[in-house]
Image (cartoon, rainbow, N blue to C red):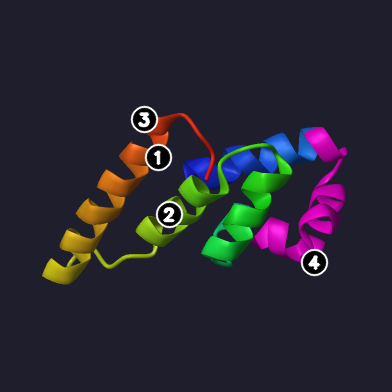
């Protein structure tokens, strides 16, 4: 959730307001507020759009959103989380946006 909040705040600074950010990424302003409060999940596509709007890597942002939504209590969730963290690390090491 930390990445999401920092992206939202950076977007607000770039676009002048939460409304400006929402317009840029094509969502209602209420989504921004609900994402910040945790009342609504920011989907991987929305996280990627947010990342693109602020000059961050959309693939890495989408992976972070997916990782946040995995059930860590299940063995499958633990394996999936590990695999996605490896992928995210590779993206980060490459230093390139996908």
Question: Over which residues does the magenta segment extend?
Answer: 14-35
Residue at 76% over, 57% down:
25
Task: Identify the element where label 2 is drawn.
Answer: helix
Residues tagged 2 and 3 counted as in contact (Cβ below 8 A): no
Residues tagged 3 and 4 counted as in contact (Cβ below 8 A): no
**Cα distance between the residues tagged 1 and 3:** 6 Å
Residues tagged 1 and 3 counted as in contact (Cβ below 8 A): yes
Task: Identify the element where label 1 is drawn.
Answer: helix
**Cα distance between the residues tagged 1 and 2:** 10 Å
Q: Is residue 66 left or right of residue 12?
A: left
Residues tagged 1 and 2 counted as in contact (Cβ below 8 A): yes
| Residue receiving disc 1 | 91
Task: Identify the element where label 4 is drawn.
Answer: loop
Residue 89 lies in the magenta stretch: no
- Mark 2 or 4, which is nearer the eye? 2
Instruction: Identify the main secondary structure in magenta.
Output: helix
Residue at 39% over, 64% down:
69
**Cα distance between the residues tagged 3 and 4:** 34 Å
| Residue receiving disc 2 | 63
| Residue receiving disc 3 | 93
- Which mark is first along the chain, 1 or 4? 4
Q: Which mark is residue 28?
A: 4
Residues tagged 2 and 4 counted as in contact (Cβ below 8 A): no
Q: Quadrant of residue 8?
A: top right
Circle 2: is it few (<14), some (14-19), or many (20+) Cα within 10 Å? many
Residue at 50% over, 50% down:
59
């Amino acid at each position: 959730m930390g990445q999401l909040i920092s992206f939202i705040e950076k977007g607000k600074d770039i676009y002048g307001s939460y409304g400006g950010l929402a317009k840029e990424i094509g969502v209602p302003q209420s989504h921004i507020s609900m994402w910040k409060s945790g009342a609504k999940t920011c989907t991987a596509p929305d996280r990627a759009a947010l990342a693109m709007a602020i000059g961050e890597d959309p693939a890495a942002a989408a992976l972070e959103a997916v990782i946040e939504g995995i059930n860590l209590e299940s063995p499958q969730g633990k394996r999936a989380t590990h695999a996605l963290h490896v992928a995210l690390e590779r993206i980060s090491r490459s230093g390139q946006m996908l």
